[in-house]
């Protein structure tokens, strides 16, 4: 499901990475209506939970759902403590509507369903005087750091990007982002298993023994492994679909995209010439 749709697949992957705790959420909502039995210590523990809850990923209405319970609970605290508990419970993390988190590194947009043909009109000249801070923020927002390392930090699902600017042209970098399945290194390719029951399974083989393959299916939670019995495997081949989702840059506007590419070209070096103001 993650690989089938670039937009919704990314939402699923992020949710699986930071799943909300169902029992905790249920209890928090039930306690939101409780008016008696509270001590200052219990209230601090309770409202601190909400700030942690906002770090989880749910559906599009998750943040608003949690905030509604939070506000219901705040209505029961003494008036002179409301501001204190509002801050403790993550009130300053939310937008005015309470339905979303305020994120400095979130793309401003408007985005576009970018194609490689669009790049000739966007990148008409060598990158220069770009914004390092925004480039780094877009690197995080497009989830590059989850799967790639740069300057010793990040994931190892995909290749290290520290030297990408010295090895590839801007066009090559953009092509790899827009169409990640065009060229897939065997080192980072996923494997497609065809099983005896007619089903197929796609993921990276993290380990194996005499009886099982241990397969990582979600690049955002690489340590979660599925056991595949070797006796049930009819065939296995490298997948022609990259583990990297296409469309990751689609939320970005043109200037944000330029800053992201500048950040990649610079290998995360703020002193690189692409960021220098002449």
Image (cartoon, grey):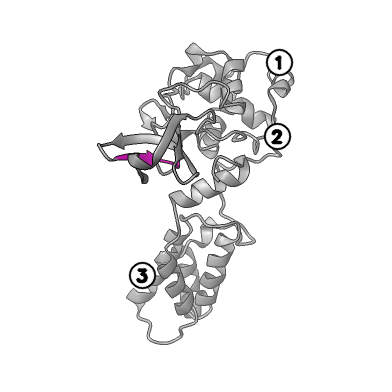
Alpha carbon distance from label 3 to label 2:
44 Å
SS at badge 3: helix
Q: Is residue 245 above or below residue 1?
A: above
Residue segment shown in magenta: 212-218
Point out residue 50 in the picture as x, y percentages from the top left corner: 45, 65
Magenta stretch, main secondary structure class: strand
Q: Circle 3 sits on which residue?
A: 45
Left or right: 239 in relation to 121: left
SS at badge 2: loop
Residue 278 showing in the rendered view: no
Point out residue 219 in the picture as x, y percentages from the top left corner: 45, 39
SS at badge 1: loop
Left or right: 240 in relation to 191: right
Mark 1 is surrounded, within 10 Å at the Cα level, by few (under 14), some (14 to 19) or many (20 or more) other residues, namely few
Q: Which mark is residue 124?
A: 1
Q: Circle 2 sits on which residue?
A: 113
**Residue nearer the viewer, 149 or 231:** 231
């Amino acid at each position: 499901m993650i690989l089938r749709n670039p937009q919704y697949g990314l939402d699923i992957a992020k949710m699986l990475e930071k799943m909300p705790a169902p029992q905790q959420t249920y209890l928090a909502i039930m306690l939101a209506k409780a008016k008696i039995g509270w001590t200052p210590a219990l209230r601090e523990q309770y409202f601190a939970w909400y700030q942690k809850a906002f770090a989880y990923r749910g559906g599009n209405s998750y943040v608003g759902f949690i905030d509604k319970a939070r506000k219901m609970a705040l209505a029961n605290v003494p008036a002179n403590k409301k501001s204190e508990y509002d801050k403790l419970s993550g009130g300053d993390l939310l937008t005015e509507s309470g339905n979303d988190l305020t994120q400095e590194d979130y793309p401003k947009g408007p985005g576009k369903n970018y194609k490689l043909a669009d790049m000739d009109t966007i990148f008409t000249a060598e990158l220069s005087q770009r914004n390092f801070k925004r480039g780094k923020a877009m690197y995080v927002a497009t989830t590059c750091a989850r799967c790639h390392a740069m300057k010793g930090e990040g994931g190892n699902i995909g290749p290290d990007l520290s030297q990408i600017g010295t090895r590839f042209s801007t066009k090559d970098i953009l092509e790899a982002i827009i169409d990640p399945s065009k060229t897939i290194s065997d080192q980072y390719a996923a494997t497609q298993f065809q099983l005896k029951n007619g089903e197929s399974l796609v993921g990276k083989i993290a380990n194996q023994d005499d009886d099982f393959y241990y397969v990582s299916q979600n690049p955002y939670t690489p340590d979660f492994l599925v056991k595949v019995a070797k006796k049930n495997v009819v065939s296995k081949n490298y997948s022609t679909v990259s583990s990297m989702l296409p469309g990751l840059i689609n939320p970005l506007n043109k200037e944000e995209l330029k800053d992201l590419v500048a950040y990649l070209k610079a290998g995360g070096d703020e002193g690189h010439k692409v960021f220098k103001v002449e």
